[in-house]
Image: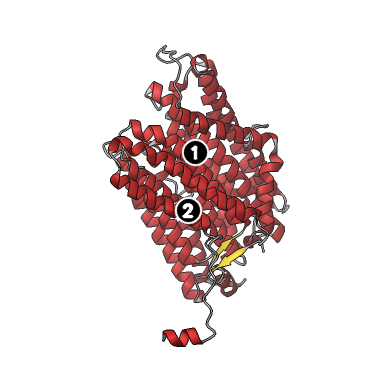
Amino acid sequence: MLATLLASDWVAPKFDYHAIAPEIVVAGGIVLVIILDLFLAEHNKWVLAPITGFTLLGAFIPVLTLALSDEGTRSLFDGRYVVDDFSLIFKGLFLLAGYVVILLSSDYIREGEYYEGEYWFLMLSSLLGMMMMASSRDLISIFIALEFLSIPAYILAAWRKRDVKSNEAGVKYFLLGVFASAILLYGMSLLYGISNSTKLTDIAVYLGDELTAIRALAVLFVVFGFAFKVSAVPFHSWAPDTYQGAPTPVTAFLSVASKAAGFVAMVIVVFLAFPGSKEVWQPVFWILAALTMTVGNLLALKQTNIVRMLAYSSISQGGFIIMPLAVAGESVTAADDALRAIVTYLLVYAATNLGVFAIVIAVSRKTRSGEISSFGGLFSYAPGLAALMTIFMASLAGIPPLGGWIGKFAAFQAVISPGNNWGYAIAVIGAVNSMIAFGYYGNVMREIWMRPVPDGDTTPVRVQPALVVALGITGIATLVFGVLPSLVLHFGDLASLTSAISR
């Protein structure tokens, strides 16, 4: 057999290692963390945090080299795994967001006497799943990537194993996550049965423009499965309890990186597999966007705990990200505008929300409280943190010239551009919700600047160096994105105009 192969003209298949170099680096970091965790003494395991951080920074280097390469789109496995501008933008987002989460986690995990090696292993594993998701163009690889990123997140949510709320957070997240995965997998199985293929572009050909009941059902099941991952109403019930019960750095991770990965998966499947099924998914996204924005905002107004308020804020922000999908099927231009808005919003939201959680971690170390009232009088003893928290809250509210305004502007522009009544209607709902949101964001700012210190303790807040770096990264990004909106819009245009999704 070997002699026959050698004598023939058989040529070994070429494999583009450069294309998957970011994933290889992260996988290597996972192996290194596992090995070191086995042999390092407990008092030396602090080195795992910087190793994890350098792994992510190392993986970012091939992302840059791929982005600067002249080869353009790289396709592997018969087009089932694609490295293009769209995937590279989100891989970069996941790596940088993961690095900031590591900065938030390093002192938190060590001071809480949690298991460190396993924590960094699970964090890297979840990030690897997110990176795989950005390049997946096949139902099987999408589902594997989704579970790869989700299963470690279930465990991380329950990391405070002696805390009843953390246990509840992990169990609730796991049970509802498994239920959502089952719904998603059933929808995917219907798609495979219809098209006899798991490749998204093949599925689009078989679905075509003619909708039958079974095809509509398959599309709905897939959309609902992803709606859970992005905590869209009415699939949001897991988010507030999970966010409150999980360790705060894990909550930051779930609210930014995990949510972004869910949106990436949703966008890839909808734009690649369902381009001719807009009669099904457009009305669904319209309803999801309206409900998610409104319910998230109204429930956020009632919250007294800062993390629960941020959980409902995250739900509401997800509604604004879904909003452009309500009109994305109207034309190629509408699809491009929608994708541009989603990419822009996710980039800005990631920087702002991570900054908020960095402030929450820093302040709660002193106050030992998670209540919004514990931020009372923050300006009197921590003016720097007060100013940054004000910047982040104003950005989430969409107030110029901070980053959040350009995210909301892009979203409203995307829904108004097609010029139909449904677009105008969802834009009005979004505008009303933007005003409602200022109620709870403004409440936090009022506590910081106008309320007295609850217990009279004006001892300065000691901020660890890692948190200072995280605040520097997120604060600068929030300001730069708002003052120089063309910078973040460029990434949106890049993904929209040159990715395989829009072609």
Lower sequence index among marks 1 and 2: 2
Tell me residue 480's x, y (percent).
65, 35
Q: Which residue is mark 1?
A: 100
Q: Is residue 437 above or below residue 376?
A: below
Q: Is residue 432 above or below residue 146?
A: above
Tell me residue 182's x, y (percent).
39, 61
Please tell me which residue is depicted at 32% across the width and 39% down the height of the picture: 166
In what element is the residue under mark 2?
A: helix
Disc 1 versus disc 2: distance between alpha carbons? 18 Å
Q: Which residue is mark 2?
A: 25
Please tell me which residue lies in front, 467 or 301: 467
Please tell me which residue is depicted at 33% across the width and 39% down the height of the picture: 45
Amino acid bearing label 2: Val
Amino acid bearing label 1: Val
Please tell me which residue lies in front, 258 or 4: 4
Q: Of the residues tagged 1 and 2, which is closer to the observer?
A: 2
Tell me residue 198's x, y (percent).
49, 71
